[in-house]
Image (tube, rainbow, N blue to C red):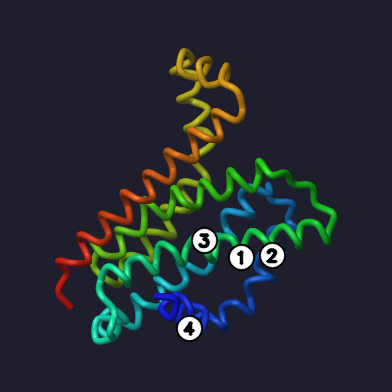
Amino acid sequence: MFHLIKRDVILQKKQLLIFIPFILFFIFMDVHPVLTFLVASVFIPFNTYAYDEKAETNILLNSLPYTRKEIIASRYLGAIFYMSIAIVLTSAALFVFGKLFSLSDIAIGSGLFLLFAACTFPLFYILKPGYITTAVIIGFIVLSAMGPPVVLYLAEQFSGITDFIMNLSIPIVYTGSTVLIMLLYLLSWGLSTAIYQRKVF
């Protein structure tokens, strides 16, 4: 399984050369650190999916001595691994250029990435190749633009729930959010595995 994760790095080595300039662009544009961490985390995993979609790599992967469960596991574990690397590099870049950020920014950015990944990874095994990357990019842009206003609107409409959450201690909020996001991520992992097991290439 480690070799499958390593394969993604090899395939994306050219893309990795533009990773730092890509992140620096967001930093110089004074984009909020949360969005910067989110975009950085998305970069490698979704580039890999986009490459595999064009090259129809699933046929090759299924000819290798790996089970389909291992192939899916490498995707989900690899996403967490690359997210961790992206966070370290982005944090270093923000620090070097004197941009303020907090652990909360990292936590929220990471949580949003895992949530977005949980929602979109199964699409790569459901939708027809050729449309998936476009759908994911559009979804990401829409969520980035519409997400905050929608959250604020819902917070106003469901003030009782909002007040309840606001009265909770910060550790409880972060712990609860982490558990919920990881649960959704695991459910997504299971769904992708179930779909991929039945898929014919």
Q: Residues within 10 Å of mark 1 (few under 14, many from 20)?
A: some
- Residue under numbered circle 2: 89
The reply to whether the C-beta atoms of the residues labelled 1 and 2 are less than 8 Å apart is yes
Q: Which residue is mark 3?
A: 42
Q: Residues within 10 Å of mark 4 (few under 14, many from 20)?
A: some
User: Tag 3 or tag 1, which sits nearer the N-term?
Assistant: 3
Mark earlier in primary sequence (3, 4): 4
Residue sitting nearer the eye, 21 or 108: 108
* Secondary element type, mark 1: helix
Q: In the structure shown, which secondary structural element does the residue marked by tag 2 occupy? A: helix
Question: Residue 146 at x, y = what percent?
Answer: 49, 40
**Residue drawn at (58%, 43%), measured in percent from left and top?**
108
Residue indicated by mark 4: 11
Q: Position of residue 145 (x, y in %)?
A: 52, 44
Q: Residue 145 versus residue 109: which sits nearer the camera?
A: 109
Circle 1 residue: 85
Q: x, y percentage for residue 91?
A: 72, 57
